[in-house]
Image: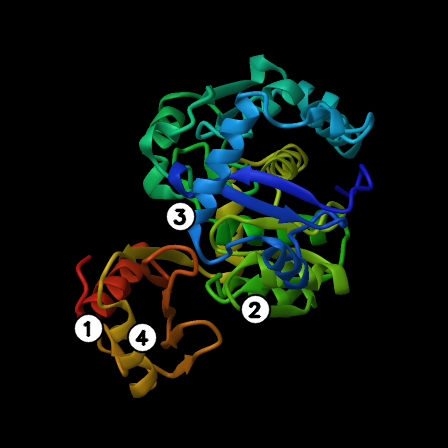
Amino acid sequence: TRVYGASAGVVITASHNPAHYNGFKIKGPYGGPATRAMTERVERALPGIGQPDEMVAAAARDYARYLGGQVNTAAIKPGDIITRDVCADYVDYLRKKFDTATLRQSRLKVAHDAMYGAGQGFFSTLLGPENVIELHNTVNPSFGGLAPEPIGRNLGPFMSLISRTQVDIGIANDGDADRIGVVSELGHEVTSHLVMALLVKYLHKECGLYGSVVRTFATSAILEKMGRAYGLPVETLPIGFKYVAPRMLESDVLVGGEESGGIALKGHICERDGIYTGLVLLEMLMRRGKPLSGLVQELFDEFGPHEYCRLDVRTPRQEVIVRRLRKEGGLRHITGSPVKEVSMLDGFKHTTGEGWVLVRPSGTEPVLRIYAEAPSRKRAAAYVADVAAQLGVQT
């Protein structure tokens, strides 16, 4: 939308959700998600809004008329519809932003899991097929029956592939390729929290860039420590990239992101882009000359270990649990540790002496999410299990 000078853009996608969530994303002329005001204008123009069955039936009738030749295509004037090879234009854009020739010559080996989505082929096109191992790189409208969300529980085969091969990094993208999941050369997931931290350090320390770090409520405390150490402002917002994008339009932001793998970077657009972020990570590996696992360890050496765990629970008691937490002001103890503070910016975030636990209903699915961070994965998992037990939900 930005490069073409379009007034708006529409993406038809299920994003990171299962195929039956297929719908519309609206983009603004600035190259980012539509503002609430733009979305409301579209909603007001939709006939039968709030009556999905009627809308689907009307769309089916219109499509049948189209197939039957009953739509007056003569009313469409020349120039009203222009087709463009958006993928080729995007590749050209990336070649101007990155030294892809040097990246090719570096011989960095990349494993890419497109998760049957729109990210297929970009890395092999830019880096050369000899440097890329591809997985789930075919068109499959049902995404193999899974949700194409690039998080650890969905990346088992991908991590297994990497552990059996010699690659420098594994990159996975969701259905519309705006999110990124990362796997180290050892076959271990590098959470999006740590990916954000690596990007902050690389862009600031290696590239000399400044700006604020805008993160959502469920992201790692390591970003606050880095902000203090590097003299970078850190702003915490409710969960959802729709809160991050406006800040990138309004102010100077170095890295903006959320725990689910949606990350936007200075010098690009105010939108998540899993392909672009993956190329920045490759550039980082090339310039630093260290394995990804070594760069993660550098972060831990400087700021202490930060491990993460998340549980998604489908429960009919979701509203009851939220009412209880609101009434009681949160939980008092987690695995025996006293809760020092409960923040309710978006959900219920309990801070202890060594970590935190956030309880929050999903904004897009009928799911209760429990997030936790602690100095070890075992401790973070224990936090999640204890909170689930206190709330009476199954792990």
Q: Where in the figure is residue 346, as x and y percent of width and height?
A: 46, 72
Mark 4 or mark 2: whose residue is earlier in sequence: 2
Under tag 1, what secondary structure?
helix
How far is mark 3 from mark 2, CA to CA?
35 Å
Say what amino acid the circle numbered 1 marks.
Gln
Mark 1 or mark 2: whose residue is earlier in sequence: 2
Image quadrant of residue 43?
bottom right
Query: Mark 3 or 4, which is nearer the eye?
Result: 3
Say what amino acid the circle numbered 4 marks.
Val
**Classed neighbour count for the residue bearing mark 1: other residues with Cα under 10 Å, few (<14), some (14–19), many (≥20):** few
Residue 183 shown left or right of residue 315 in the figure: right
How far is mark 3 from mark 4, CA to CA?
30 Å
**Classed neighbour count for the residue bearing mark 3: other residues with Cα under 10 Å, few (<14), some (14–19), many (≥20):** few
- Which of the labelled discs sits on residue 390, or is there none? 1
Mark 3 or mark 2: whose residue is earlier in sequence: 3
Is residue 355 in sight in this rendering?
yes
Say what amino acid the circle numbered 2 marks.
Leu
- Which of the labelled discs sits on residue 1, or is there none? none
Q: Which residue is mark 2?
A: 237
| Depth order, front residue of 317/23 | 23
Mark 3 or mark 4: whose residue is earlier in sequence: 3
- Which of the labelled discs sits on residue 322, or is there none? 4
Under tag 3, what secondary structure?
helix
